[in-house]
Amino acid sequence: MPATPSANRLQNQIALITGGSSGIGAGVAKAMAAEGATVIVNFAHSTDEAAAVVKEIADAGGQAVSFQADVSKEDDVLRMFDFVREKFGTLHILVNNSGIQMDAKFVDMTLEQWQRVIDVNLTGQFLCAREAAREFLRRGPQPEISSALGKIICMSSVHEVIPWAGHVNYATSKGGIMLLMKSMAQELAPEKIRINSIAPGAIATPINLTARDTPEEEKSLLTLIPYGRIGQPLDIGKVAVWLASDESDYVTGTSIFADGGMTLYPGFADNG
Ligand code: NAD
């Protein structure tokens, strides 16, 4: 899918994308860089994947660096924010995107499976958002760059509202992100920090490969999507750019569902 022509809506802004080395995070990193942001591509393990995203951005004329950190570890997150401050002076945009699934039937789920998903998906978002907010407050307003003091975008999921059997750790983490986001947004709006979520439906990325790797599975997935196609990372990148830009300056504390209608209860369509 081609990127929309750049309007430089994020010019002179520094954006940190957690889990920016693959899938949705890579799509967001490329979309933000195409709008003039300097992007820090955080990654957990895959140095090569992160380097490839950085190279693709540089080849397209953008600015990007990568940084390895486990978002569930406080020391790693503090180290990452020190790096951002030392290298770029400050931060304007955080995209809290890192996330994992460790699926199991509820009765078989181990404490480790439960805890790791909560640690990465929920505690990771808390740690990064706290450091971002601290940095926005330390730096102070730069109205020539952005109307808001800073912007935080939390990658949630349709599963912040749709229960998901066999994935209770994941759905719980996303439900938690909804109230983490709203509570942070309420507390920090007076400081002019805007915080919103994107709740994607089914986007073609490594996280859900097993749910769509045969034609039958893809067909079954499409029955859940009234708009009739699986989403692409750039579908989410475009929403993230808008949420980070001044075009959405009056938007805070909301979840934008980018899901092709998955949350419209498509199973009820023929049962009226
Ligand atoms: P993905 O597996 O490609 O991306 C997940 C990213 O998180 C990877 O870059 C990975 O390196 C990173 N990550 C994992 N553990 C980490 C850690 N401890 N520290 C730092 N980074 C870590 O999958 P994706 O679909 O691109 O997922 C991105 C986000 O979008 C996740 O939060 C996911 O829950 C959410 N989401 C995805 C979909 C979908 O259909 N793909 C739907 C709804 C929500």
Image: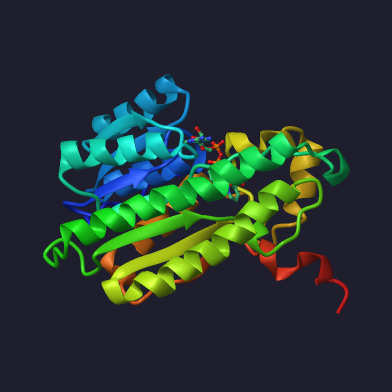
Regarding residue 252, the answer to whether it shows in the image is: no
Q: Residue at x 59, y 34 (%)?
A: 206
Which quadrant does the C terminus fall into? Answer: bottom right
Q: Residue furthest left?
A: 144
Q: Residue at x 46, y 39 (%)?
A: 71
Colouring: rainbow
Residue 220, image x, y percentages: 80, 47
Q: Residue furthest bottom?
A: 272
Regarding residue 89, the answer to whether it shows in the image is: yes
Residue 239, image x, y percentages: 43, 59
Quarter assignment of residue 65: top left
Q: Residue at x 25, y 38 (%)?
A: 82
Picture layout, residue 110 above or below residue 166:
above
Q: Residue at x 32, y 48 (%)?
A: 32
Front-lying residue, 222 or 160: 160
Residue 13, image x, y percentages: 21, 52
Looking at the image, residue 249 sits to the left or right of residue 109; the answer is left
User: Number of callouts in the render?
Assistant: 0
Looking at the image, residue 143 sits to the left or right of residue 155; the answer is left
Quadrant containing ligand 1? top right
Residue 58, image x, y percentages: 25, 31
Quarter assignment of residue 48: top left
Front-lying residue, 98 or 247: 98
Front-lying residue, 195 or 145: 195
Picture layout, residue 127 above or below residue 41:
below
Q: Residue furthest top?
A: 48
